[in-house]
Image (cartoon, helix red, strand yellow):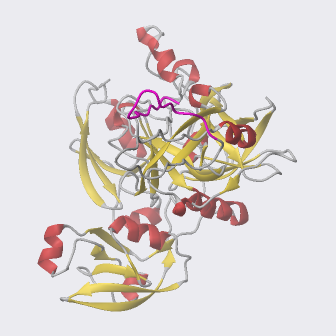
Amino acid sequence: MNRTITTVLACFFVIAAPLTAPVFAQAPTSTQVVPAQILPNFAELVEKHGPAVVSVSTQARQNARGPAGLSEDDPWYELFRRFMPPDQQRPQPRQSPQQPRGQQEPRGPLVPFGAGSGFIISADGYLLTNAHVVDKADEVTVTLTDKREFTAKVIGADKRTDIAVLKIEAANLPKVTFGDSNKLRVGEWVLAIGSPFRLSNTATAGIVSAKGRDEVDRGGVAFIQTDVAVNPGNSGGPLFNLKGEVVGINSQILSRTGGYQGISFAIPIEDAMRVSDQIIKTGKVSRGRLGVLIGAVTKDTSEALGLSRAAGAVVQNVEKDSPAEKAGMQAGDVILKVDGKTVESHTEVTRVIGNTKPGTKITLNVWRGGSARDLAVTVGEFKDEESRVTKPAGKSKPSAAPGKLGLGVTDLTAEQKKELKITGGVVVEVVQGAASGVVQQGDVILRVNNTDIANTKQFNEVVAKLDLKKAVALLVRTEEGSRVVTFRPDAE
């Protein structure tokens, strides 16, 4: 570990201890010297539970994915890009002949596409990883610590929570045990095992830095924040507590360089299991829905409405015929409690309702007109493209290839247009390059510069005429509303 500890006197040394929680000496008297803290030894944990951690590699058909056929998310992409000739450092357009309408373009050979980690949850071959690890892959390979390789079947992947379930044909496999992430304490030691930069079964340790980080994602996940070294390739790997129990799935890092900078995020194992159980049992993920647009309660809002503090969620819009409207909810209401439990933020409301089984009757305590009241609501079912399980390659329509802007788009369905109350636009399926961080999967593009977009064909025609050295403005529609985003496609 690259962690150091400072002691009061140099003559006191840090020593290794058995795999137990850190031990502290008794409080010193005025004449005593504070002894060194005893640090945990993770060797036994790694030896016992490391075999249940796997490396996940993906392959895709060679269709201008990038250098050497790699995705830009692959940990080796940057290395290849830096050492390739300048004219090959960006994905090149396909030079295949035009295909007649209705015929699918021939697909090239399988080439390496991405890499990540995963872990075995049952002895008969079910595994968990991140959805983004297997997204867009045509073939998935799982490698065990004993070097055995298996072609994995993607049972399903839920992009909203970034959870995917894989299955390999094997028996008597080592499997992990699950802990309770709710019992984690900030400052507690945790360990990650994974395959950063394809270096399999790499162990890194750190502490829990914070809990309930729901502001870093729109999927309704309250992340565990740690300072464990997590890098590209660690995605989908387990986060262990000192008991050797999995308490999270390493999923994201906060970084300006693309590598570890001290802040990592893991999906709580309870969220992961809730999603994976649904995928395995029913083949889909079901979420609760109120049918409201909600926002944060600011200090100014709480003061204006007479609330004692800035907490809860302010209702900005109520959909017609939605569960919320049927329960009598109105725009301007502030949701304070769900089934008697106080909610601190609008993201917590989204998460709690999303985790509620459709058809469940709940009680919402709302603030209206200077006083609180209870509303009885029957939770509906949330339906959108993000909540549906992504099926394995070959069982769903092929994803759109990214164009000059690094955006792959598809046409909206009539149902989506009706739900969003729009007549045109395209939905973003793939995001690469300079558009990353500005536009997200699931966003709807309504306008490019000054041109309204009706469908995919028009979008591609408009984009083809753009000067990539100039800034591009997109009018984007999301579930939160509309916004204008600007970026330079040619920016490094």
Task: Name the residue at 47% across, 31% down.
Answer: 12
Image vertical order of residue 19 relative to residue 334, above or below: above
Q: Residue furthest right?
A: 171
- Tell me residue 197's x, y (percent): 57, 26
Q: Residue furthest top?
A: 85
- Tell me residue 43's x, y (percent): 67, 36
- Of 458 and 447, the residue lying toward us: 447
**Count of marks placed on residues:** 0
Magenta highlight range = 1-17
Q: Is residue 16 magenta?
A: yes
The answer, for residue 344, to whether it is visible in the render is: yes
Q: Main secondary structure of the magenta part?
A: loop
- Of 480 and 93, the residue lying toward us: 480
- Of 21 and 190, the residue lying toward us: 21
Task: Name the residue at 36% across, 61% down.
Answer: 479
Image vertical order of residue 91 relative to residue 101, above or below: above
Q: Indicate the quadrant where residue 281 lies.
A: bottom right
Q: Is residue 202 left or right of residue 302?
A: right
Q: Is residue 340 left or right of residue 470?
A: right
- Of 178 and 476, the residue lying toward us: 178
